[in-house]
Amino acid sequence: MQIPAWQRLLGILVYMIPWSDAIPFGNNIFAQLPFLQWFAIPAVPIIVLQRGIPFGGLLLFLLLFLAVIRNPKVPYFLRFNSLQALLIDIGLILLAYAFRILVFPFGTGLLSQTLSSTVLIGVLTIIIFSIYECIQGKEPDLPAISEAVRLQL
């Protein structure tokens, strides 16, 4: 079945939500390689929404979850990509809390910089793969995450 272009575009846009939460992990990389800051530009509208509106991140989550993922009238391709992006985002939020509790109390040394950079590069790889698959009109198949999404939908 051919996926329409508007569904592909919206499928790509939902992956900007986890990307906006991954950008703070890249402070060290962005400081050392300033040209990489261009990769942050697509996530700026999401960041402005999350920080500009009180509880913006929660409202965006609820809107996507209730209006898109749990709505059977929305095409499966959009529901799949939205839920997968939200699961990636939830994982990033949990990682951010783990970093604040376990890593950052020991300072911002080489270990914390390396772990933060690894998270950013990993998420960037996942996002690029997912965008490429959405452009192709396919469901991005991420191990464990895609399986959980299929079970929920």
Image (spheres, rainbow, N blue to C red):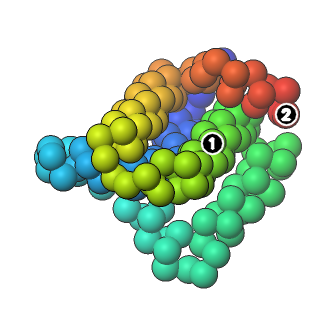
Q: Secondary structure at mark 2?
A: helix
The residue at the point 24 percent across, 44 percent down is 29
Q: How many marks?
A: 2
For disc 2, the marked residue is: 152
Q: Does the rendering let one see residue 32?
A: yes
In the rendered structure, the answer to whether residue 84 lies left or right of residue 23 reads: right
Can you tell which quarter of the image residue 132 is in? top left
x, y (%) of residue 94?
Answer: 63, 48
Instruction: Between residue 141 and residue 106, name the one nearer to us.
Output: 106
Between 62 and 121, the one lying in front of the other is 121
Residue type pointed to by label 1: Gly
Query: Up-down: is 16 above or below 1?
Result: below
Q: Which residue position holds label 1? A: 91
Around disc 1, counting alpha carbons within 10 Å, would you say few (fewer than 14), some (14 to 19), or many (20 or more)? few
Image location of residue 30, percent across then percent down: 22, 49
Q: Is residue 50 above or below residue 85?
A: below
Distance between mark 1 and mark 2 Cα atoms: 17 Å
- Identify the image quadrant of the N terminus: top right
Q: Where residue 67 appears, x then y in whole percent?
A: 77, 57
| Foreground label between 1 and 2 | 1
**Disc number for residue 80:** none
